[in-house]
Amino acid sequence: METEIRIETLEGWAAETYRLIDIREAAMQEYGMLPGAEAIRPEELAETLPREENKKRVLYCTRGQYSREMTDTLRAQGFFEVYSLQGGYFGWLHHQMQKQEAEQLAKRVEGSIQKKFHKKLWSRFTKAIRDYELVQKGDKIAVCISGGKDSMLMAKLFQELKRHNKFAFEVEFLVMDPGYSPENRRVIEENARNLQVPIRIFESNIFESVYTIEKSPCYLCARMRRGHLYHYAQELGCNKIALGHHYDDVIETILMGMLWGAQIQTMMPKLHSTNFPGMELIRPMYFIREADIQAWRDANHLHFIQCACKFTDTCTTCNNEETKSKRMEVKALIRQMKKSNPGVENHIFRSVENVNLDTIIAYKKDHRKVHFLDEYDAKEENPAQEQPEEN
């Protein structure tokens, strides 16, 4: 008996005749779920689902492989009317994209930026550009698109900035393919077409280069990707690359540095490149909250790639608890702290703007470590010099 169903078949069923069950990891579900789906962990299916039910049960994972295996297992245990959605989340995603009209979608998305999300997205985008002087007359900026929600929103914001800015600058919408799966590559290309973002794609083999690295492959991958982006942007005549890091990335990086790196540092809004003279990195989404990006995505019924990494984008790992990153742990920690301290996120963000060096044991400046004992006795000999109050 056939246990797989096509998306077109599912759309032909009445909504009340089936249950749609997402068995992916929670972190993947945050990127979007099929409308009406409920989340059930694979190991809980046998306990949660009745063996017989008047509704068809349709399971889906990332690409349809793991859900097909779970469907076979459940049927062998006596569960009836259980099916796997062919192609999984990605299959449904591609199907949805093909149904969208690019011009209408682009206009709707642009309208939402200027109206519904003007304050939370557009205003914060332009505030970062003003406050940190990120875009200047004559710039040629490579807007780097990874294919996720953050970078695709950044691309649309830059298009708006081009339409309304008072001085001339140029942009190139740059996509580096470090070895994406064909499905991920296709999602990026379809989104760019639908949102009318004229992307320029160049390829590298970074994923293959770091695949066999056991220690810190993510760190090496990030550095290699950054280097390739700088190099290609420079070849195009760009003097800046723009990355889609947002406010939540900043505060999570601060905590990760403290908890795992034993250091206090932040993700800077702009940086001069040390390896590519004349090049600069900018982060114009510095003040934008991730929740607002997700709200914009969902309001416009947009769907983006979830995890493009070669290590985690296969169906065999879509429910693997070990793939949870330190960043996910920090996100959970911040959510927990926010329950008793609603302003904790803003406090973390502002903490690196209010560093009192008089109360710091040591700090680094230009790769040189400065210790408080270096000037401790000198301050005693100069009582006029202001001293910090004792705690």
Image: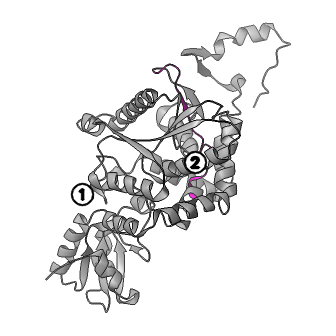
- Front residue (pair 391, 220): 220
Q: Are discs 2 and 1 less than 8 Å apart at CB?
A: no
Residue 165 visible at all: yes
Say whether residue 22 is left or right of residue 377.
Answer: left
User: Going from the N terminus, do you reach mark 2 or mark 1 first?
Assistant: 2
Mark 1 sits on what residue? 316
Q: Secondary structure at mark 1?
A: helix
Q: Give x and y (percent) for residue 179.
A: 29, 43
Report the amino acid beneath label 2.
Gln
- Front residue (pair 3, 378): 3
Q: What residue do we see at 62% from left, 57% from top?
A: 113
Q: What residue do we see at 30% from left, 78% from top?
A: 8
For label 1, the crowd category at 10 Å Cα-Cα, with few meaning under 14, some 14 to 19 and many 20 or more, is few
Q: Give x and y (percent) for residue 60.
A: 31, 70
Q: Give x and y (percent) for residue 228.
A: 38, 31
Mark 2 sits on what residue? 159
Check if residue 288 falls in the magenta segment. yes
Q: Report the magenta residues as a range.
A: 276-291
Say whether residue 138 is left or right of residue 101.
Answer: right
Check if residue 52 falls in the magenta segment. no
Q: What residue do we see at 42% from left, 50% from top?
A: 147
Residue 61 visible at all: no
Q: Secondary structure at mark 2?
A: helix
